[in-house]
Amino acid sequence: MDIASIRENAKKDIQNAKDAKAIDAVRIKYLGRKDGALTNVLKSLKDMSLEEKRKIGVEANALKLELEGLIEKKEKELSAKGGKRLDVTKPGKKVALGHLHPLTKIDKEIRDIFSSINFTIVDGPELEDEYHNFDALNIPADHPARDMWDTFWVKPTTDNGEKIKVSEKSGKLLMRTHTSPMQIRYMETHKPPFQIIVPGRTFRYEATDASHEINFYQVEGLMVGPDITLANFKFVIETFFKKFFGKELEFRYRPSYFPFVEPGVELDIKLPGGKWLEVMGAGMVHRNVFDAVKYDRREVQGFAFGMGLDRLAMIKYSIPDIRLFYSGDARFTEQF
């Protein structure tokens, strides 16, 4: 089809188009990238002589601009005929906004509060080794936490069957059961004084119910220096919880046991008009932990604590079942 025929036929088709669908079909018929009539002419220029290229190329490009203008004009005409009058006094439609997951909101709040009191935020690997998850934290080989019913042990091979190199010291691979391994990893590469928190996902191989999940979030805290005591811990943690809940709280400390601290304590809080709630395990870092990272136990001391981010979210938002966080139900997320 020559340039003149394309121009004549295209103008007729544009004139006869009755709606947006028809004018769109005209555009594809003549200007479509794959098989448009005018597009094919332009594609064929490479096979023409220099003189033909100059003549036909100029005509084809001029026609392309002409047809694009006619099509645009026709679209405006059709839109004016079929469109509704805009009522500028009518209220606009409310824009639907997305919602942050409650755990995301809690995580950000915790980070912001600890950052405001000069704590550094640290991240660590979810795939851990036995040494950092257990050995260096003073958890002996026969400790119940080592039992495979509590831990997701990982085969040391890739999808291709290649063996992952793990040193004898590191031991087997596992999905971390707590965020405490970052205590060791951080102290291996940093010298005190420092204070850090480690928010992150952890994994336990156990039955799920309203208060237990195989995947949940923890926040680990660690402060180490020459003169750190439980009085420092008490000030830091009470400051955090008062800011987090925005209320005056009651605090209760109970002696407890954790392998990586000595002495160990558990912290309960009581919201106004509420009941006592257990929220945290903590204590002074065990001397064996300092030995594992080659700190001089005579020169430094510190405290560590761990709390469940999911647990805090359940308390703050009165959520009865931890499994709701991982349900993927938008009706739940939209409440926040």
Image (spheres, rainbow, N blue to C red):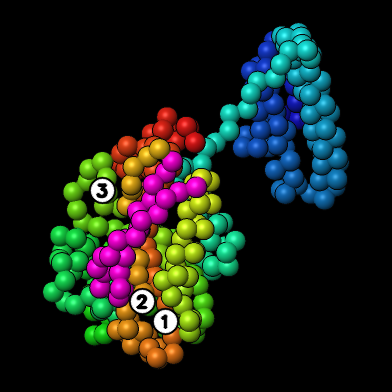
Where, quadrant-wise, is the N terminus in this rendering? top right
Residue 211 in view in this figure: yes
Amino acid beneath label 2:
Val
Q: Which residue is mark 1?
A: 301
Residues shaded magenta: 248-272
| x and y percentages locating residue 28 in the rendered image | 65, 28
| x and y percentages locating residue 29 in the rendered image | 66, 26
- Labels 1 and 2: the sequence-earlier one: 2
Q: What secondary structure characterizes most of the magenta part?
A: strand
Q: Which residue is mark 2?
A: 285
Residue 26 in the image: above or below residue 162: above
Q: Which residue is mark 3?
A: 212
Amino acid beneath label 1:
Gln
Amino acid beneath label 3:
His
- Labels 2 and 3: the sequence-earlier one: 3
- Labels 3 and 1: the sequence-earlier one: 3
| x and y percentages locating residue 55 in the rendered image | 86, 41
Q: Secondary structure at mark 2?
A: strand
Residue 202 in the image: above or below residue 142: above
